[in-house]
Image (tube, grey):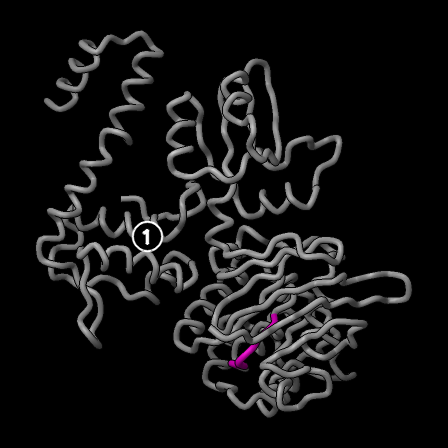
Amino acid sequence: MNLEVAVDDGRPIFVQIAEQIEGQIVDGTMPEESQVPSINELAAFHRINPATALKGVNVLVEDGVLYKRRGIGMFVAPGAREVAVARRREGFRAKYVRPLVAEASHLSITPEQLSEMIRKEAGQ
Amino acid sequence: MTAVIEVEHLTKTFGKVEAVRDVSFSFAEGGIHGLLGRNGAGKTTLMKLMTGQEFLTSGTVKVFGQSPVENASVLGRVCFINESQVYPENFRGKHALKAASQFFVNWDEEFARELIADFGPPLGRPIKKMSRGQRSAIGVIIGLASRAELTFFDEPYAGLDAVARHMFYDHLLADFSRNPRTVVLSTHLIDEASNLLDRVVVIDAGEILIDADAEQLRVEAVTLVGKASAVREFAAGREVLGIQQLAGMASVTVTGLDDDDRQAAREAGLEVGPVSLQQLIVSRTGGRTSATKEGAAS
């Protein structure tokens, strides 16, 4: 899990914050109903402006991935993992498959050879 | 959000030199704002005008809705930490802190002690015998512990090493979260500070060059690397900040790409990379020489 934000990436920091929390929900580091770090903890950890951290968390609140308990903090919503996994799947093709196929084509690797490689890799 | 600082058509001349020329901007209440620019761009003059330490030539400066000049009701709410702060002769570190604790109504003594322990300046030493780093530490401690509603840090950590600077960022963020207020930070260590900032005003040769949300600036420009022909084709008709070529490859810095454009660039076989705030400012403030033809894409 990459906890670094910002420097290496041209996208907005709040998007990276949201994706990172989502990633932790997907991989089980943050189970459903567990408490999410506070805005101030996120800001301090990543050395970012608290307003940016808030914006990132609000993206997930709007999507129903996180919910607020008044006066206590932010929690992972029930069913959040399913939502997060579904969203990651949507982006999977563009983010991973397309560049993979493009690079394979540059190297004259046929689709058959590529799927064989994937099968072997998954079998390990 | 209400504006804490409103500057309109501000001009300041020293003799024939226009240090600040027809500058207008505002800073909202509650945020960490960056006032960035090259040495001699006018940052310190601007801060002095906003804290009533210089008289303006024309235009208006309003702080908390009023002119700051000789205005105790404004200046009592403002803390200005200046790199080249002049202290009275024979003043020691502890005297500076004592004076600050009496002047600033929101002064937090406990927080000051915590900062002293972290930064470790020799409080018993005369300030004029301190190293640059030790003087910077005194300034940073006062600036943070004063908890003034409006705090200016003018190159606050010129003498601090990397460890102490990160200590400053951590304390600033943690304390800002607990006690929201307005902070104006001027620095030329732009990349270090860029993620802390809400709003960025870049001044160059006395004029405003950039006035935007930091977040917006982060995504404004990207670098595209790939085959020269593909890069040229993609960059045609866009705002190009810099271009660099090596054999059949080219790297170009362009602005104004949305997500679809980025995707299109990737599909055209181009590598899309980020441009840091510092690189963006360098390319916008003409910081290049014949030896460094491309500052923005390096």
Magenta span has A41?
Answer: no
**What residue lies at 56% left-to-right and 76% top-to-bottom?**
B4
x and y percent of residue B223 in the render? 51, 33
Q: How many marks?
A: 1
**What residue lies at 50% left-to-right and 60% top-to-bottom?**
B197
Q: Is residue B192 left or right of residue A73?
A: right
x and y percent of residue B123 in the render? 62, 80
Closest to the observer, B101 or B285 = B285
Query: Disc 1 designates what residue?
Result: A17
Estimate how packed mark 1 is, as few (under 14), some (14 to 19) or many (20 or more) residues with alpha carbons within 10 Å. many
Give the extent of the magenta segment.
B147-152
Q: Is residue B134 left or right of residue A65?
A: right
x and y percent of residue A64 in the render? 17, 57
Closest to the observer, A21 or B233 = B233
Q: Secondary structure at mark 1?
A: helix
Q: Chain of mark 1?
A: A
**What residue lies at 56% left-to-right and 69% top-to-bottom?**
B27
Q: Is residue B78 above or below residue A2?
A: below
